[in-house]
Amino acid sequence: VQLQASGGGLVQPGGSLRLSCTASSTYMFSFNIMTWFRQAPGKQRELVASVALNGSTNYAESVKGRFAISKDYARNTVYLQMSSLKPEDTAVYLCNIDLTYYINNQPAGRKDFWGQGTQVTVSS
């Protein structure tokens, strides 16, 4: 499974960005949990937002009310809509997808995969 993340960039404080993470594979798979993390220079990686198969979501306190995670199963994509961005949101954003993969239409295992990261810089 390969994950391709995109959508990062430079934005002014108060601005918005939408990140995307698309999964592709020669195997059939289904998503379990999709998560966005971020890592700023000199800081530990932190969970930003996650969405589970049943649609339940979880957000870091620092982004509640500003960020929204969503998924599009038809496109095998998870999104992170970021609004009211602050300089402290500056980081590399990474997607992680926990999925079940299938062989001959039977569940064959569960594994998580990481995207390559996309840089978000919030600065005036």
Image (tube, rainbow, N blue to C red):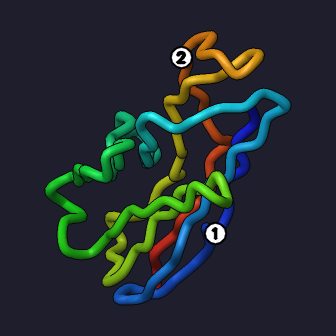
Q: Residue at x 54, y 65 (%)?
A: 120
Say whether disc 1 or disc 2 marks the residue closer to the N-terminus.
1
Look at the image and tell me in which quarter the N terminus lies: top right
Left or right, residue 22 beside residue 124: right
Q: Residue at x 25, y 50 (%)?
A: 56
Label for residue 110?
Answer: 2
**Amino acid marked by disc 1:** Gly
Corner quadrant of residue 53: top left
Numbered disc in front, either 1 or 2: 2
Q: Nearer the viewer, residue 100 or 115?
A: 100
Q: From the top left corner, tell me how far across and down residue 36 is, in percent.
A: 44, 48
Q: From the top left corner, tell me how far across and down residue 81 is, in percent.
A: 43, 73
Q: Nearer the viewer, residue 89 or 97?
A: 97
Q: Is residue 48 above or below residue 63?
A: above
Corner quadrant of residue 62: bottom left
Q: Nearer the viewer, residue 11 or 100?
A: 100
Q: Which residue is mark 1?
A: 7
In the picture as drawn, the residue positioned furthest to the top comes out as 108
Q: From the top left corner, tell me how far across and down residue 29 is, in percent.
A: 65, 32
Left or right, residue 91 beside residue 45: right
In the picture as drawn, the residue positioned furthest to the front comes out as 105
Q: From the top left corner, tell me how far across and down residue 6 is, in percent.
A: 68, 62
- Separation of disc 1 and disc 2 at Cα? 27 Å
How packed mark 1 is, by other alpha carbons closer than 10 Å (few <14, some 14-19, many 20 or more), is some
**Amino acid marked by disc 2:** Arg
Q: Is residue 45 above or below residue 49?
A: above
